[in-house]
Image: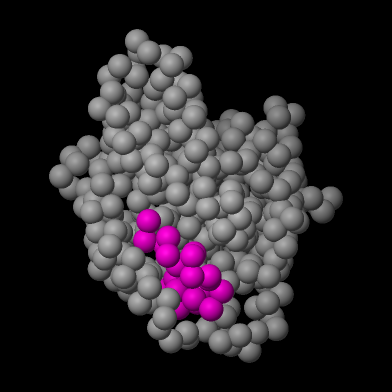
Amino acid sequence: MEINKSENMGIKSIIEKFEIEGQVLSAKPFGSGHINDTFHIENADSKYPDYLLQRVNHEVFKDVPGMMDNIWQVTEHINKKNIVSVNSLYNQETLELVKTHDGKLFTKTADGNYWRIFVFKKGLKSYDLVETLEQAYEGARAFGLFFNLLSDFPTDRLIDTIPNFHNIILRLQTLRQVVEKFPEGRAKQVEKDIKFVFEVSDQMCQIEHLKLKGEIPIRVTHNDTKFNNVLLSEQDKGICVIDLDTVMPGVVHYDFGDGIRTGTTTAAEDETDLSLVQFDIKKYEAFTAGYLDVTREILSPIEVEFIGLSGALFAYIMGVRFLTDYISNDVYYKISYPEHNLHRAQCQFQLTRRILERLPDLNKIALRESQARTYLKK
């Protein structure tokens, strides 16, 4: 969809605040993100890069300056490691922020909106659904490298861009609250889904309880490792992890779990035919091999022990979030039709069931891969 002329003029005035090279040829909506608004800025001069302009959703990200500082710190940290590394297996591209003319990482317009620009990475692609085992392995390996490269970064230097983002204990409390608030509304229509949520809640809260007790270490994590947040080359080699808004302190299961949720399913996130929602254990195997190839020397035994559960946890978390938003009359996620959040929730709960059915096998695979030979040597 093209933006209209007046919108285009407004966007051009925003772009002019940044230190871009070349001239703007066009600005078109880009991507399928739920939260921010993104535009592909095509450069009229082929000698210079294209850009991605984003309007940050400051209703979701309450501290935009802090978030932007997080992104700057972690990308600089990774870039410095890439420079000194002699091991090509260690290198990973990062997002490249474009500063404003006065040296800032973003600009704020008179209407209160925050805008930022990244260099557009040409020749790379992402997948909403994983098509091959090689893609699963390579995407996981890129996520694992991102985690590895930040394993020595002090967590106290980062803000929580969304406090308690993956705290399923609090997510369940919020769900209870909205059910009580809207008892005769949508909550009445989804009693079966609510019942499932609380039937498995004890198992789904295990990782968070271990985190709160200090038994699982806090690390720098990406926290939004949907498979389409890793860019692959034309040859399907993992190149760059993107969408760094939620980089903050967390546990490894947050990253591994969301990667499994989106990298091993056979259906789209909002599939309405639940018979099509299956779990591909071969892709799980490939994803686990790729991720642990570059992280196994970092992870503790208890972290590995709960790797298998994390995929089910993240399908469950997303299901709870979508269901909560549906009952609340769709105040958070963008929707395309009235039942969109409900269908998303039911799809994620079905995936949760499918993963839990294979949990013993998943634990065996994770243990086996954690004990395999490490290909990345520091």
Q: Position of residue 98 (x, y in %)?
A: 70, 57
Residue occupying the point 73% across, 46% down: 66
**How far across and down, in percent of the image, does residue 183 sit?**
38, 13
Residue sticking out furthest to the left: 275
- Name the side, left or right, on which 296 lies relative to 268: right
- Most extreme residue toward the top is 184
Q: Which residue occupies the extreme right position in the image?
A: 102
Q: Is residue 200 above or below residue 283?
A: above
Of 202 and 166, which appears nearest the observer? Answer: 202
Residue visible at 41% across and 55% down in the picture: 310
Confirm whether the magenta stretch covers residue 109: no
Q: Nearer the viewer, residue 50 or 377?
A: 377
Residue 1 in view of the camera? yes
> Which residue is nearer to you in this view: 331 or 170?
170
Display coloring: one colour
- Please tell me which residue lies in front, 292 or 237: 292
Magenta segment, which residues?
Answer: 289-309
- The residue lying at 28 percent from left, 54 percent from top is 355
Q: Residue at (60%, 61%) from the top-left corner?
A: 217
